[in-house]
């Protein structure tokens, strides 16, 4: 069974940092593009960042540029999202997702396997 197991969310003060992890179970992530999405209450799910299978290509939403860093460790079958300088508007449930065929894109349409989500709350 293909599963993505997420960890690393929580409550952090504005300006703080969190690192989210997304580990694959039942398959290897080596050949796939991986993305992080987020969904705030009452809003659409939006793409935050993605990384190609080789790690050579990364993309970021404008809201994440300069603050978030996506990376992958294929030996650990895990993808990470390092989030720095967090703002209250970053509060959302964060999801990782696998694109089984194709390049790194920030549209949810292209992603077939999803993690269950992890809550990130930025508040003082």
Image (spheres, rainbow, N blue to C red):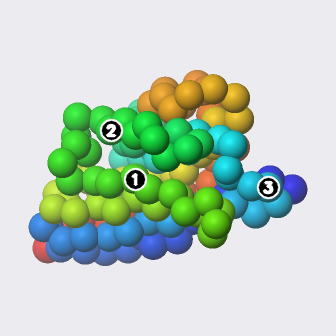
Query: In front here: 99 or 54?
Result: 54
Q: Residue at x 37, y 36 (%)?
A: 59
> Which mark identifies residue 34?
none
Residue wearing tag 1: 70
Q: Residue at x 51, y 32 (%)?
A: 104
> Which mark identifies residue 27?
3
Looking at the image, do the residues carrying marks 2 and 1 touch, with CB atoms under 8 Å apart?
A: yes
First-in-chain label (3 vs 2): 3
Secondary structure state at the residue bearing disc 2: strand
Residue 24 in picture, x, y percent from top left = 69, 60
In three-dimensional space, the C-alpha distance between marks 3 and 2, rounded to whole angstroms, equals: 25 Å
In three-dimensional space, the C-alpha distance between marks 3 and 1, rounded to whole angstroms, equals: 20 Å
Q: Quadrant of residue 47?
A: top left
In three-dimensional space, the C-alpha distance between marks 2 and 1, rounded to whole angstroms, equals: 9 Å
Tell me if I can see residue 42 in this picture: no
Q: Quadrant of residue 16?
A: bottom left
Secondary structure state at the residue bearing disc 3: loop
């Amino acid at each position: 069974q293909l599963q993505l197991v997420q960890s690393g969310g929580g409550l952090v003060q504005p300006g703080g940092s969190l690192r989210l992890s997304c580990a694959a179970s039942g398959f290897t992530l080596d050949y796939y593009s991986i993305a992080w999405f987020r969904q705030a209450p009452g809003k659409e799910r939006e793409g935050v960042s993605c990384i190609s299978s080789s790690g050579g290509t990364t993309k970021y939403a404008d809201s994440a540029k300069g603050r978030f860093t996506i990376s992958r460790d294929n030996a650990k079958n895990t993808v990470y999202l390092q989030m720095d300088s967090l703002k209250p508007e970053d509060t959302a449930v964060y999801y990782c997702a696998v694109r089984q065929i194709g390049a790194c894109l920030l549209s949810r349409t292209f992603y077939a396997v999803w993690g269950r989500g992890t809550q990130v709350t930025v508040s003082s």
